[in-house]
Amino acid sequence: MTNDINLYLTVATSGLLGLGMVTTAGLSGWRGWLQLKQQELGDRHGGDGPTVNTSSAAARIEMADLKERIRKLEAIAAGVDL
């Protein structure tokens, strides 16, 4: 009889600890996801922070790459060898 009570208490305690760990991990993931979405929205609307500087630099690099591709396509269309 005493072993049954100890077993039930051990199982219940382990279950509660497991549930607490899963809940904590889920909450941490949720907060991280919310922070990511806030950064994405800040980048779109010109928010302040270091991520804006890196994304604008990346945007300039991408724009230069696209312009170079357009020049090459125009040269091909005109029949000019590069």
Image (cartoon, rainbow, N blue to C red):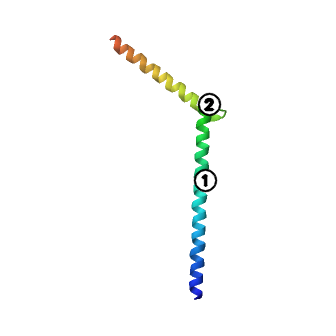
Relative to 45, is 3 above or below? below
Relative to 27, is 16 above or below? below
Query: In which image quadrant can residue 15 be found?
Result: bottom right
Q: Amino acid at mark 1?
A: Ser
Image location of residue 10, percent across then percent down: 59, 77
Residue 81 in sight: no
Quadrant placement of the N terminus:
bottom right
**Mark in the foreground, 1 or 2:** 2
Residue 68 in sight: yes
Q: Residue at image x 59%, y 50%?
A: 30
Q: Residue at image x 42%, y 21%?
A: 69
Q: Residue at image x 61%, y 58%?
A: 24
Q: Secondary structure at mark 1?
A: helix
Front residue of 32 and 73: 32
Residue carrying label 1:
28
Disc 2 residue crowd, few under 14, some 14–19, many 20+, Cα 10 Å: few
Q: Amino acid at mark 2?
A: His
| Residue farthest toward the bottom in the current orientation of the protein | 1
User: Whole-Å distance between the Cαs marked 1 and 2?
Assistant: 26 Å
Disc 1 residue crowd, few under 14, some 14–19, many 20+, Cα 10 Å: few
Image location of residue 55, percent across then percent down: 57, 31
The reply to whether dot 1 and dot 2 touch (C-beta < 8 Å) is no
Query: Which badge, 1 or 2, comes first in the chain's sequence?
Result: 1
Q: Which mark is residue 45?
A: 2
